[in-house]
Image (cartoon, rainbow, N blue to C red):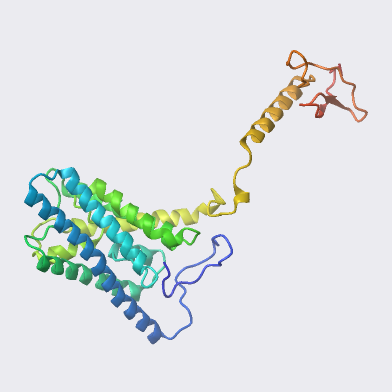
Amino acid sequence: MPFSGRQRAPADSLPDPNFTFGAPPKTSYLAEIKDDLYAALLEYVGTVFFLLLAYGGTQAAQGEALASGESSAIEHDMYISLCFGFSLLSSVWLFYRVTGGLFNPNVTLALLITGVIGPVRFVLYCIAQLLGGISAAAIIYALTPGPLASNTFLAPGVNRAQGVFIEMFITAALVIAILMLAAEKHNTTPFAPVGIGLTLFVCHLWAVFYTGAGMNTARSFGPAVVTGFPYDNHWVYWVGPFLGSLLGSGFYALLKHMKYWRLNPGQDTIDPRDSPGDPMTHIKTTVRRSISSVSRGRGSSVDVGRGSAGQFSEKPVAPHENGVVSTGGVDGEPSRGPLRPNDSAV
């Protein structure tokens, strides 16, 4: 996710804990504003593109269910989840090199908190995304028959507090996916749209029945504006995703503070020489070392021979001139241990 105004990290090194984001290049202020305006305009186009596909799929699912009367709730929810997940996947893949492909004020807030974008671009992006949600909802409402089916609302039995927390957790999941797959640079960054789209898909599988799976204030705001705010719990889709932005960016900051790349190093390499060795060799080495350690602990000599009985056999050995006893090793390999007082060499 390249962003204007973001300092580049060293290309051939691991993440630098002293590296700071948000330091803009030395360009004129007017040039930066011009770039931000262009980016915001294209972010508006991308948001309309994403939500047009997602709202359209939702409208089609609702229309087909009403027309046939045979669609189950599970099929309906799966249809909507697929629409949103794959719409985001394709839209982000098209726009992430242009604007970052955010399409979500809550993701934009997380990038502001982590220093990926500046405050001017944050404000412009949020305006563009909210307008994009309204435009997409209005287009679908004008082009398709029946009432607009893409409003988000709480299902019967789900109270407002539950709705806020559901929205918080699924938004945090999306934010973490974007920060770890796209903002963090690694070998699989070009394929980040796949992981981001799948994250949106699985979050919808959980939440679309309970809250409509907003996860995106612009996604909920657009249909609400077009239909005149028909539900009194619309604020849930502002508070929940806002808290999710804080939670997701906070977890990302914790990972960076813990220097997560040191906990499981080498996971981004594609060098086959970094693959595990022969497991059989590892097992043999471990067994030999274990037998040698046991023999030293008992102060006796153990020889792993290949006699007729195929058993371990003890061999008497002479003490070494420097004060250590040479004990029988594994497969004829000598091992040495200290000669303790009152120990016998045989």
Is the residue 210 above or below the residue 87 in the image?
A: above
Q: Nearer the viewer, residue 342 or 316?
A: 316
- Quarter where residue 345 is shown: top right
Is the residue 218 above or below the residue 265 in the image?
A: below
The reply to whether residue 55 is in sight is yes
Identify which residue is drawn at 33% across, 80% down.
38
Residue 286: x percent and y percent?
A: 66, 31
The reply to whether residue 150 is in sight is no
Q: Quadrant of the N terminus?
A: bottom left
Residue 29: x percent and y percent?
A: 40, 85
Is the residue 30 above or below the residue 288 in the image?
A: below
Residue 167: x percent and y percent?
A: 25, 52
Identify which residue is drawn at 17% across, 48% down.
76
Q: Is residue 108 left or right of residue 62?
A: right
Q: Nearer the viewer, residue 11 or 65?
A: 65
Q: Nearer the viewer, residue 330 or 120?
A: 330
Q: Quadrant of the C terminus?
A: top right
Extreme residue toward the right, this view: 321
Q: Is residue 54 left or right of residue 335?
A: left
- Quarter where residue 276 is shown: top right
Q: Is residue 294 left or right of residue 346?
A: left
Q: Is residue 339 left or right of residue 96?
A: right
Number of labels in the image equals 0
Identify which residue is drawn at 67% across, 30% down.
284
Identify which residue is drawn at 10% across, 62% down.
229
Extreme residue toward the top, this view: 309
Residue 8: x percent and y percent?
A: 50, 70
